Image (spheres, coloured by chain):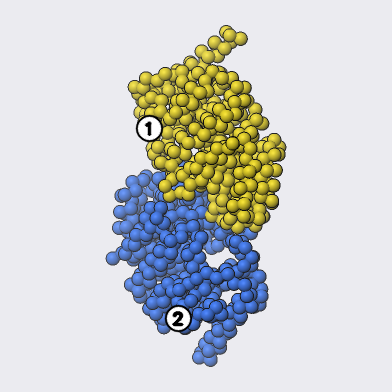
Chain colours: A yellow, B blue
Amino acid sequence: MNSRQTVRISPQAEQYPIIIGQSLESEFKTLARSLDVSKVLVVVDRNVAEKQHDLLKTISDAFGDAKIFELAPGEQSKKWDTLKAIIDFAQSHNPDRNTPLFAVGGGVTGDVAGFAASIILRGIPLFHVPTTLLAMVDSAIGGKTGINHETGKNLIGSFYQPKAVFADISTLDTLTDEEFVCGFGEILKYAAISDPVIADILKNRSVKELRENKSQLESIIQRCVKIKSTIVARDTRESGDRAFLNYGHTFAHAMELILGYGTISHGQAVYTGMVAAGYLSEEYGAMLNHEVIQDFAGIMDIDPDLFNFTASDLVEAMKSDKKRKDNNLRFVLLKNYARPYLHEVEEIAHVEEAWNKAVGFFRDQKKKQSANS
Amino acid sequence: MNSRQTVRISPQAEQYPIIIGQSLESEFKTLARSLDVSKVLVVVDRNVAEKQHDLLKTISDAFGDAKIFELAPGEQSKKWDTLKAIIDFAQSHNPDRNTPLFAVGGGVTGDVAGFAASIILRGIPLFHVPTTLLAMVDSAIGGKTGINHETGKNLIGSFYQPKAVFADISTLDTLTDEEFVCGFGEILKYAAISDPVIADILKNRSVKELRENKSQLESIIQRCVKIKSTIVARDTRESGDRAFLNYGHTFAHAMELILGYGTISHGQAVYTGMVAAGYLSEEYGAMLNHEVIQDFAGIMDIDPDLFNFTASDLVEAMKSDKKRKDNNLRFVLLKNYARPYLHEVEEIAHVEEAWNKAVGFFRDQKKKQSANS
C-alpha cells in the first residue's frame, strides 16, 4: 500500500499530497483522470531516463502524450542556459497554464525544472517525482527551486510549491550505494534537529540492510517528510525556523566551496558538518551524546584525507557565503537533540576548534578501521 | 500633498502603499530610514535616466549608495539576455535578501526589473517607480512581471508584488504627447469596466488641458489604481475576474501581433479594441451609449489606414494567442458600462462584424476631421 501525507506548506498555500510507495502506477492514473489535459511535459535526468524506463512508461501511459526533455546529469545542469533550454522545450509544445510539468530525478532536476515551471506562463502546475533518497526526504519538499550563478550556488530561483510529490521507493534500487547513502546526511539531520528516534531505528545496519528493508525506508521517508513540511509550513520564505534545516550546512557549504562540488557528496558534507556542529554546540553549553550522530561514520564513509585545508581556510569560506545578511557567522546549534536554535558566533576560535575536533574524530575512525581490517 | 493608498493585493499577501504625488522626496527619505540598508539597486530606462536626473538624485540621496543599471528603451529589453544582464549587475554588487531593487521607468522596465527582483536570491524587495501614465495606472499595479519569448509576448515571468509604488506625477511632464496619451487606453478601459465617471471627467479636453490639470490627473490615477487593485485582490493569479482588465485587449493583442509592436501604441490598440468590443457587446444584447468611449477618438488619434488587413486576418491572430486554454475565443464584453462579463464567442462572424464597424467608425472620424480642417 502506498502512503499519502497531505501537507500544507503555509496557511495561505494550497495543500498538496506527498505520495510514498513502491508502485505508483494507479496514483498516476488517478491524477491523469483528475487533470484532464491533452499532454504533459517531463523533465528527466538522462541517467534516470536510462534506468527508469518503467517509471517514464507509467507516466506516458497514464497521460497519453508525454513530451520528454532529458537533462544532463549533475550540478552543471543548474545553470542559466539549461533553464532556457527547458523553457524553449516547453514553449515548443505550446503549453497553456494547465499543462503540467513533471520533474523526474534527483535534487538538481527538481531545482532547475521546478524553477522553469514557476516562470513558464508565470507558473504551470509542477509535480515532483524524486528518484533519489536525498530528493525524497529533502529537495522535493518545501518549494525551493533554483539554479546557480557564476558567483555562487542557488543565487537565482523562486519559492514554488508542487501540486503533488510522487516518491516511488522502487526507483531507489537503481542507485549506487554512494548515491543511496548520500540521502543519509539529511536523514540524520532530521534525527538531530527533531526526531532522534530516526537514528535509533537506523543504527548498526549495513548499507545493504538499510536498502533491503523497504517498509523501514518508507517509514523513515514519511517521518522526514513530516518534519520538513512542518518546519517549512511555519516559515515558507525562510526568515526564521526554516533555518534549522541548515543544521551542519554552514560547515558543509564551506567544505563544498573549498573542495569543489563533487569531491565530497552533499550527504557526506552535511554529515561531517553535523559532527563539527555537535562539537560547536558543546562550546555553547550543550551536553550531547555524540554517538547518536557519530555511530553512522561507518556507512557515511568519510575520508579525512580530503580535509587538507586549515580551519582558518574553512572560516574564510563560510564568510564568503553570498546569502549572509551581515558579517557574523550564523549557525544552527543544538541545546540537545530535537532542540535546535540559531546562534551568531563571534568567537571564530570556537568554530575552528569544533572543526579540528571533527577532523580528529574522522582520523581516529579511519585508524580503527585500518586496525580492524 | 501626496496621496497614499494602501492596497492588499490578496488576502494572503502583505499590504503595500501606492504613493501618488508631485514631489516624493520626503517619501523616499522616510522609506530609507525604515529600510536601513547600506545600498540599493536601481534599474532605469536609459531615456528616463537622461530626463529624470532629479528623481534619480532623490533616490541616490535618500539611500546613500544607489547602484544604477540603465536599460535600453523599448519592448526589445523584455528579453532573456536583458534579464540575465540585470541579474549579473545585481550579483556584482553582492546583494543580500534585504537589498531593495527600484524599477524606474515605464511598463517594460517594471516588467523586466520586477521579474529580476522576483528571482534574485529567490526574491529581493521590489519598489516600482513608474514614470509613464500607462505604468502608473496599469503595469506597476498588480504584481505581474515578465519578459517575452521568441514564440510570444509575456510567456516567461512571475507574480511578484512590490513593497511599495511611488508614482511621481511631475515625471509625466517629460513625456511626449504620444507617450502621455498612451495611458488613456487603459484609463478609458477602467471607465468602461468599472467607473464611467472617469470618462465624464475627461471628455472634451485637449491633450494640453489634460496634461496641465495636475490635481485632476492625480485624482484619475487614484481612481484607476483603486479599480485595478480591487480587481486584482479578488483574483491575484488571474483565473477569474482579473480577466475583466483585458477589456478590448483580445482585439488589441491581435492588432499588435499583425502590425508588429510599435506601429501602433498599446494605448491606441486598446482604445481601438474597446471600440470594437463595444460593437461586439451589442451583438450579445448590450445597449451601449458608444459615445462614452468614442468621444475620445480625437485625442487617441487613431489612423484607420493602418488597418490594412482583413477581419479574418485579425481572427486568425486572435487564435494564435499562446495563453488560450482551448480553441474558443474568449472576450470581455459589457452588459453595460461597469458591468463586464466573460464570453466564449463561437460566432466568428460577430467578431468580424464588430471589427469592421470599428474600422468604419475610425474612417468616418478621419473624414470629419479632414472636412473640418
Q: Is residue B347 above or below residue A294?
A: below
Element under disc 2 = helix
Residue toward you, B348 or B17: B348
Q: Residue furthest left?
A: B1
Q: Rounded to the nearest whole Å, what is the CA distance between mark 2 and mark 1?
A: 62 Å
Q: How dense is the environment of label 1, judged by Cα within 10 Å: few (below 14), some, or many (20 and up)?
A: some
Residue toward you, B150 or B62: B150
Q: Is residue B17 visible?
A: yes
- Residue at 37%, 45% (x, y): give it: B38
Percent x, y of residue A31: 60, 48
Q: Quadrant of residue B323?
A: bottom right
**Residue at label 1?**
A342
**Label total for image:** 2
Q: Quadrant of the C terminus of chain A?
A: top right
Question: Does residue A314 appear left or right of residue B361 in this picture?
Answer: left
**Residue at label 2?**
B292
Percent x, y of residue B372: 50, 91
